Image (tube, helix red, strand yellow):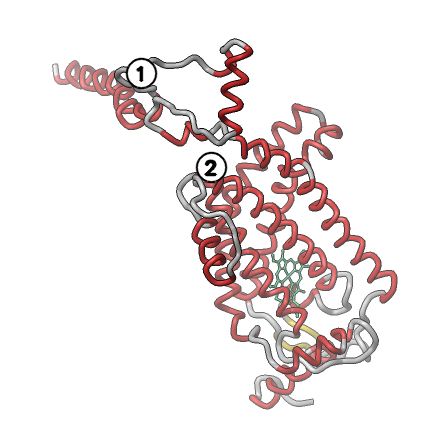
Amino acid sequence: MSRGLCRWTRGILIALLPLLFLGAFGGELRAQAVPGVEASPPATLLPEASRADVWRAVRRGEQGYVAAPNMLGGQLIQSEGEVWRQIRLGAYKQWSAWILLGAFGLVALFFALRGRVPLEGGPSGRTIERFNGLERFAHWLTATTFILLALTGLNLMFGRTLLLPLVGKDVFAVLTQWGKLLHNYLAFGFMLGIVLMFVLWVRFNVPNRYDVIWILKGGGLVGRAHPPSKRFNAGQKFVFWSVILLGGSLSLSGLQLLFPFTFSFFDPTFATLNAWFGTQLPTGLSPIAEQQLATLWHGFVAVILIAIIIGHIYIGSLGMEGAFAAMGSGRVDYNWAKQHHDLWVAELEKRGVVPAE
Ligand code: HEM
């Protein structure tokens, strides 16, 4: 008897599940009947002449109506969407390609002209700690997630042009689908990475007077001078602040794309810029305009940061003898440290962290 009852209870619960689902999401799924309003047929089913009228109205910015409770649906067809599409597939994509090719070109040119920055005097055989375990964890978490985000993101921008003809539709579809999923989830690792980096390194990245000397002497990369430097030089501070500020902006615009119609960052930013600098940026942006701006901004900032990071990866690996060890084992040769960060070594010696030579 009790077994029979149990079966019944289970049966009723299973029968109720679709109802629960409908209760939770039905409002979104059902088109509501609006009393006194007759639903008009979709624009594509209208005769040619009335279809033209509909599009003219859309071009004038007139908003249609939807009978579904989700009013955002009424904005899906709007003239700006076409403008956005044209920008995205036109100049925007071309400029992004040029910026990335330019970054590779500059690195190659630099390597051809300057070669690998040598470790002067050779290795001393004595090493000092440059980055501890937590610092290296923060760096590699940010680096691995960023590289995968960059590859999967660039696939969204250029994949149809570059990858699709190479691998075919089926493989491209699978790669892109998995890539997009990866892109969504890895973003959280990247955000954690930049927060950690900020907390660990911000105090070493406050600009000081040595940065001016470093910049004036071309960082010692141009020519043979060795401008004085504390733990991070001006070039590294530039990389740090780029990662924090551009990475932060990437994160915010990414969240706006991940959770559509939840945040509006552009409207308040434009209003603030107008108030502070007298610019004439549009305000009162519609939710869909916010989303369109977020896609453009996200891709633009990503391309700039990728270009900067191409330079960073070069100098941290192939471009400078002895640099990689800093993030590999965490220890660098004493001569390398003296050559590139003399003031930092002097400070460590003064504090007794490292025995003086
Ligand atoms: C394979 C890729 C990468 C390599 C080989 C690499 C290498 C290095 C090395 C050797 C350092 C220490 C430099 C020193 O001792 O002074 C460093 C620092 C740093 N890395 Fe990376 N890195 C890579 C990717 C990334 C990525 C993707 C990001 C961020 C998106 C990043 C952000 C930073 C920052 C902010 C610093 C501190 C500032 C600086 O030294 O420029 N790195 N990296």
Residue where numbered disc 2 is placed: 288
Q: Nearer the viewer, residue 321 or 247?
A: 247
The quadrant in which residue 34 appears is: top left
Q: Residue furthest top?
A: 47
Q: Quadrant of ligand 1?
A: bottom right
211 is higher (above) or lower (below) than 148: below
Residue where numbered disc 1 is placed: 37
* Relative to 207, 217 lies left or right: right
Q: Residue furthest left?
A: 1
Q: Quadrant of the C terminus?
A: bottom right
* Relative to 334, 288 lies left or right: left
* Relative to 96, 119 lies left or right: right
- Residue displayed at 42% across by 25% down: 64
Q: Nearer the viewer, residue 62 or 155?
A: 62
Front tag of 2 and 1: 1
Q: CA distance from mark 2 to mark 1?
A: 26 Å
Q: Amino acid at mark 2?
A: Ile
User: Label 2 neighbourhood size at 10 Å, few (<14), some (14-19), many (20+)?
Assistant: many
